[in-house]
Amino acid sequence: MMSSNQLMEILLLTTMVADHVVAQTAVCVPQPTCEECMMKPGCAWCSERNFTKPGESDTSRCDSEQSLLRRGCNSTQIHNPKNKLHVRKNRTLSHGNGYTVQLMPQHLRLKLRPGNPMSFKAQFKRAEGYPIDLYYLMDLSYSMKDDLEKIKNLGQEILSALEMVTKSVRIGFGSFVDKTVLPYVSTVKAKLKNPCPTRQTTCQAPFSFRNVQPLTSRVEDFKKQVSEQMISGNLDPPEAGFDAMMQAAVCTEQIGWGNVTRLLVYTSDDTFHMAGDGQLGGVYVPNDGACHLSREGLYENSTIYDYPSVGHIARVLSQNNIQPIFAVTEKSVPTYQELSKLIPQSVVGVLQEDSSNIVQLIFDAYNNLSSTVYLEHQQLPPELQVTYDSYCGDNNILRNQKRGECTGVKLSQEINFTVTVTVTACFKESQHIIIKPQGINEELHIEVSSLCGCNCKDLEVNSPYCSDGNGTFQCGICSCNKNRLGRLCECLQDTGEEDTKDLDASCRNGSSLVCNGHGRCECGQCVCSGKHRGQYCECDDMSCPRSDGKLCGGNGLCGCGTCICNENFTGPACECSLSTNDCQKAGKTCSNNGRCRCNRCECNSGYLGKFCQTCTSCNCEKYQECVECHIINKGSPNPECHEKCEKTGVTKVVEDFSDNLKGQPCRLKNFNYDFSFSINNEGDVHIQYAERQGMVDRTIAIVGGSLSGVVLIGLVIIIIYRICIEMYDRREYRQFEKERQKAIWNEANNPLFKSATTTVINPRFIND
């Protein structure tokens, strides 16, 4: 078992490594004061007197520690506070004798520079046999009638299933329906007393939430209380599940939650009401997240406070280390799966219509929850950033996460996290971070202070160094009194216009810009900005050439735009090493086939390789006659070929059409063949050759094939269209014939018709 002292050493070592990495990678941005300098990562401040050269501003005192040392600043005068870590509480991981520790360390104090991250290790090991409190929260609306009858006899089975993983289990029971106002339940007197759909069935009055049985280890009490429960009813499908979950979570004393693993089993066959739904019933006051249970365990203020929101429920469950298990019927599973994504450390299971599988569902859900570990922080202050690296075993490493996460964790398996804390801005009072595993009632408290000030001990008010008492000296610089200017407060501020022009003229060097535009003129002298220096700020120590993204290749110093290279380096950007170590092989420089330049071989024409060891043309010419002879004789034995090949050390020549030539490739000039040769350890030369494939003009075939394809597809489309039209016409004609045959015409007199009863003859009509 690792001791506290050993862990502290590991933590400090990790911190030192993290600080070293930041010091190497962070680029200092110079600042004019020590306090501002300390706020920039990678910066240190030199408070030594007379450190700055003529023309240099006080910002040149702010630089990397290595640069300040190179420039001659005394190491005792350099202010570069390092991140510090103090372990205040660190109990080892253990379980037994009523004492359980699953997370270490427990309390740390950090002092951090802004922008300089600090990393430390956190360890977690889930204790085997850790006690469990399980609160069974059941929907008692009328559609759950079969489920209630089933659950009355399952108390012992639930306890027995959980006793397989722990010996200490307590179980409780609560129920919910809905708010007792319209439109959630009927407010008719008879329906309030008996909300069942039929008068023959007896139901209890509706309610929002009732704590029926606080957590107990006595199965008899659980069975007795649950057996006395009756079904109830409401009007709309959604239930008051969120009201019930809120009260079950915040009423710690009434429910009886212990400092153990807390499970909340939520069973329902429908969805839930959430914040805003209460307005339909005239309930406008937002949920206050407080406990409002009466002595009888009834939620009294359900008609005063609205339903909680999803975010409110998620936060309260997380704060109280309660892990919900949603056991719902299949039709509601998609809704609760989306809800589970928003509630940390929750799981959804499919409940059968009569809840007969609830025991196995709870057991599987608990195993699923216990095998996943999340390590996360709560309510992070805006000046702090926290990231996690998770080491979950079997080389499974997840880096730079917003929270630590490991899945498939077994009981008693130790997992490690690297937590990195970064301060982004200075703050006066210490900030606090709480890091905890989800669903586990253990926390890591971190107290963070920012290292922003400069503890300079050279304070001199009205210092003689500042032009005979015209300023205050501190941290190597003068803060001038009123109406005084200059690096040493040597100038009066109220000079006339003509005097100002004369002073500005002394800050110009053949340029129209004062101090070449890289500084300001004070008392007739240039005070340069940034990395500029010189009498007229003409030198820029950041304008030197770069190599590999580094100023002077990291192999020298930049002096007034020119690299001053370290020993054994040369070039405009000090990119060229004068060493020849990387050019040597077997005592030869570049295999005598090139020259060493900047510690790299530059090969002569016809040679390749890191050490110019490969000849690209000489061997091809050497073996060409041998191969050509074999091609002419088509591979048959020939004394002439044997002589030519033996002369050059060739022991085997093979025609190979597999296009798998190995060794150095060559190409013949007089034949359409390629060949390659390889030399084994004994010096034998093996040659393979194959005929080079000629190019075939496939333009006509491609164009012809494309046109044929287009024509063919067009014909197929026309034929299919004609077939469809023909089939449609035939079907319509058959339908017409069928309807015509059904028509029956009867010959009968019109019953309304009356024949003429009077005949009138025209007297003038003459009938021939």
Image (tube, rainbow, N blue to C red):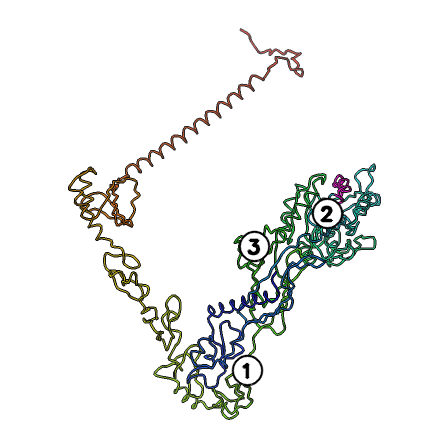
User: Is residue 131 found inside the magenta-colored segment of the image?
Assistant: no
Looking at the rendered structure, the secondary structure element under dot 3 is loop
Looking at the rendered structure, the kind of residue marked 2 is Glu
User: Contact (CB < 8 A) between labels 2 and 1?
Assistant: no
Q: Residue furthest bottom?
A: 468
What residue is drawn where x is 60% and y is 11%? 763
What residue is drawn where x is 52% and y is 20%? 734
Q: Is residue 327 above or below residue 127?
A: above
Looking at the rendered structure, the secondary structure element under dot 2 is loop
| Sooner in the amino-acid sequence: mark 2 or mark 1 | 2
Tag shown at residue 239: 2
Residue range highlighted in magenta: 136-156
Q: Quadrant of residue 287?
A: bottom right
Q: Which residue is mark 3?
A: 392
In x, y percent, where is residue 325?
68, 48
Q: Which residue is mark 1?
A: 456
